[in-house]
Image (cartoon, rainbow, N blue to C red):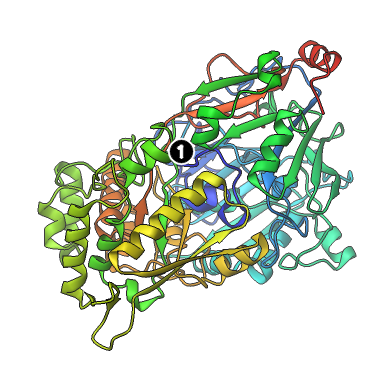
Amino acid sequence: MIKHAEEKKFLEFSRRHVLGLMGSSAAAIGFGLPGRVYADDDEMVVAHGYSFFGELKYPKDFPHFDYVNPNAPVGGEIAVATRGSFDGMNRFASKGRSGLYSGLIAESMFADGPFGTATPADRLTESYCLLAHTVEYPKSKRWCVFHMRPEARFADGSPLTAHDAAFTHNLFLEQGIRSYARAVKQRIKGVEVIDDHTLRYEFVDGISRRSLVSQVGGTPVFSKDWYERTGERLDEPSLNTPMGSGPYVVDDFEVNRYIVYKRNPDYWGWHVNVNKGRHNYDRVRVEYFADDAAEFEAFKSGVYTFRAEGSTKRWATGYDFPAIDKGFVKRQTLKSGTPPSPTGFIFNFQREKFQDKRVREAMALAFNFQWTSASLQYDLTEQRHSFVQNTEIEAKGVPEGLEKAFLESLGDVVPAEMMTEEAVLAHTSNPNTTVDRRNKRKALKLLQDVGWIVGDDGKLRNDAGEPFQVQFMLSSATSDTAEAIITTYVSNLQSFGFDAEMEKVDTAQMQQRFLDKDFDMLFTRNQSFQTSGTGLMQTYGSEQAIVSSWNPQSLQSPLVDAIIEASLETKSREEEVASLVALDRALRYLRIQVPVGYVADNWIASYDMYEHPEELPPLAVGYLDFWWQNEEKYEALKAAGAFG
């Protein structure tokens, strides 16, 4: 539902690491680069990029991505806002709360968006070289070699070499987030520096080859010398930013107030094709605010200049202020080609009370989407049923064709009813009242079957007389609309007999308790998925569920595990899609989340000085990536007194 709100740190992660997106394809096939000797008689793939199915869209030495304006003006500033606080600039620290976008300073072998934009934003399963100019690997993908650009430099001008990349790989294993380090150790046998600009990764035998090359190709590279010289640690909060090589560097910040990222005029990679038409602002400024109201007031007065609106109430009623009337601020509705974030109420599966699926179904019945959308969201949201809504991966009806065959191949781990019943849909409710009596009766019957009975005092109790207690944790930075939705849902649960209450905590405490899985329920999102990859094991798999912050429910399901494992072995895009449809079906069958509504489009409000290519790519709006500032419009707004 709140699709456009700034992501919190515990929801940040590289597209490649979370989704395991990439696979293999190449523009050229040979037997290794000249001068190299291989002990492997496997047919070799040598390429400027990597994709699992089919040929790469962009040929070797392509001038730029199709969706960018290669002649975009360079300069100016875009200022955005976020709520909460930060206490450091080390994005990868295991504790504390790092500054928004603080990980942008580092680059990888494959290009990615420094502000989290999909790259390329027009191809779902492709990556293109950045720090490396070539990747090669045998068809078996038992290993891969990156041939790095000798001109690559860190922000301080020092050379970036294979030694730095190998150091960073090992640094993540020693000091990185536990779930990620564990996943890497299980898949990457080792890394070898062949020479200053050649790096070889060897992969573990007997596992899926699906996302191994893309995983190592998406690992950020830091300066070995900087870490050794400063004594900093990857896992500890720090106000020092690690030394990276990206197009932006940290220019200035004041804790809990603002961060300014500056375009590096001496950036080594301005000539590389994947960067053409991108990174056009001289400065990207992030303003911090304690609450939603203060944040919006600052936008109205021009303290910051660009807003991705996430509040239905504000979009419907809030844009009536002088800057709008004077034409300083314009609003845009831009289409989205990606599934809406699977946002909703999640259960902590480490709590015994949520183990029975009937309990989760009963609790879902307490949420009234129709009333919520009409009364709190101005009928601007649509009901979400799927974790991949509005895509070819959305499960519909009963399993058929390739999906049916895929599920049948998994054997008894698939419940019989999942093969014969239609995909679970979110229930409908009476829009005229918060509590739908029909849904309440159904919920109480489900709870009674599990052993929770409503007593004379109206409270649900088990055989031991214990009440069914549920505590919702929410951040002090939660928007007014989101808090109203949570409050209404908690009230509905209370009317069903649950001993439900809300606990509001500050953003730092919210962060730590989320990482520690110290909550009953909360309002957040799961990761969506459009391709298969080992990242699915971190987001939905059992093995790392307890330690993975990307599996917020701590979901441990043999059914889901079996689907993910089998999806990694699919041999075509058609088979892959079928396996992911099955994953969507299973997650909905298990009722791991109470889905809320979503906004199909992207709502943008900005001071009228930003421009973008006429046709935006399907995978990103890209306002921090390939938009630009019109200097004449900026000067006109400045002369008119538009900015606070």
Which of 323 and 266 lies nearest the eye of the viewer?
Answer: 323
Q: Where is residue 41 shown, x and y percent of the image?
A: 47, 52
Residue 573 is left or right of residue 615, and the answer is left
Q: Residue sitting at 63 percent across and 61 percent down? A: 191
Instruction: Identify the secondary structure beneath mark 1.
Output: loop
Tell me the kind of residue under disc 1: Thr
Q: Residue sitting at 85 percent across and 59 percent down? A: 225
Q: Which residue is mark 1?
A: 125
- Neighbor class of circle 1 (other Cα within 10 Å; few <14, some 14-19, many 20+) is many
Residue 176 seen:
yes
Q: Residue furthest front?
A: 456
Q: Where is residue 182 shown, x and y percent of the image?
A: 54, 69
Is residue 412 positioned above or below 373 on the image?
below
Q: Where is residue 325 shown, x and y percent of the image?
A: 66, 15
Q: Residue sitting at 33 percent across and 42 percent down? A: 371
Q: Residue sitting at 39 percent across and 39 percent down? A: 375
Which of 184 and 605 lies nearest the eye of the viewer?
Answer: 605
Residue 208 seen:
no
Give the quadrant of the C terminus: top right
Q: Residue furthest bottom?
A: 464
Q: Where is residue 512 shown, x and y percent of the image?
A: 62, 68
